Image (cartoon, grey):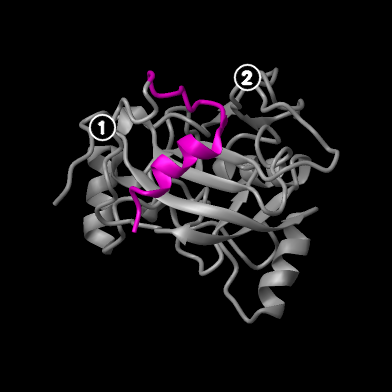
Amino acid sequence: MMQLSSKKYIGGCGVLDAKRPASGCAATPKVFIRCASTPVPSDRSQRAIRFYLNSYHPLGETEQGIMVAVQNRIPHFVDYSIRREPDFQNPFPSVTGLCRCDMFVGQAEAGDFIAYVTVKSAGPRRIVAILQVLHKMPSHAAAADWYRREGLDLPTNCVVHGNDALPIALAVPPKNFTTYAAWKAGYRWRSEHYPSFLICRAVGGPELVNPPLVPDGIFGAPFPNTRSPKQLTKTDFTKLRRLLP
């Protein structure tokens, strides 16, 4: 059994009940989910392919998550939430605005590459997947239509009617958790206000059982803070790509 951390708290996309939204999110009267505060620079014109570094909270980050994984025979390195973000287990992994609002999915375009690593709080950093964006869809409904036309199950982070969130028994509630209903409502609100949806293909991994460790000095400098996605040079991205079979 692999234990990543003994921490009792998973941060990131916690549903909050408050009168004003966190930085980076549009206002909503009752429920909102925190966002990181520094957006990736936007460039809507034609441009070269970009290489991004992104991170997520794995289910096995906490003792509770490890227990959930073992009891339900779930890989330790899937995302921790009721809407897996990203959903690595679909044949065409998906990335949405459920976690970071429009700060990444609003900037990424078809053809771009994304390297996904675990957050620092999950213990030694690991690289789990290298994705390439195949299609950028304008909404979750449009993405759902694409998956259905391909005869595929919908990814768990596709928030449309008939594709309910996972049971809470298969996830770990975030720090500011109130109720399961509020957690689901927060994600639905985000899917409506930040609707861009990235349909991807895996070009490395996903390795959800024992992903490779990422050396701290892999870039010859301190590893970037991944609270907000970072754009990498092709040279640095290739260093990560070589870690995954």
Left or right: residue 12 compared with residue 69: right
List the residue tagged with mark 2: 37
SS class of the residue under badge 2?
Answer: loop
Q: Is residue 85 above or below residue 6?
A: below
- Give neighbour class at mark 2: few <14, some 14-19, many 20+ (Cα, 10 Å): some
Determine the secondary structure under disc 1. Answer: loop
Quarter holding the C terminus? bottom left
Where does the image place residue 17, in percent across and percent down from the top left?
Answer: 60, 26
Q: Amino acid at mark 2?
A: Ser
Asked whether residue 9 is in view, the answer is no
Q: Is residue 240 above or below residue 201?
A: above
Q: Quadrant of residue 46?
A: top right
The residue sitting at 72% across, 43% down in the picture is 48
Q: Is residue 129 located in the magenta-colored stretch of the structure?
A: no
**Residue 36 appears anywhere in the view:** yes
Kindly give the residue lying farthest to the left in the view shown: 1
- Identify which residue, 233 or 105, lies in the foreground: 233
Q: Residue furthest right?
A: 45
Task: Using the image, tell me which numbered label, if any, was put on residue 123.
Answer: 1
Front one among 90 and 129? 129
Residue numbers of the magenta segment: 221-245
Task: Identify the mark at residue 27; answer none if there is no mark.
Answer: none
Along the polypeptide, which appears first: circle 2 or circle 1? Answer: 2
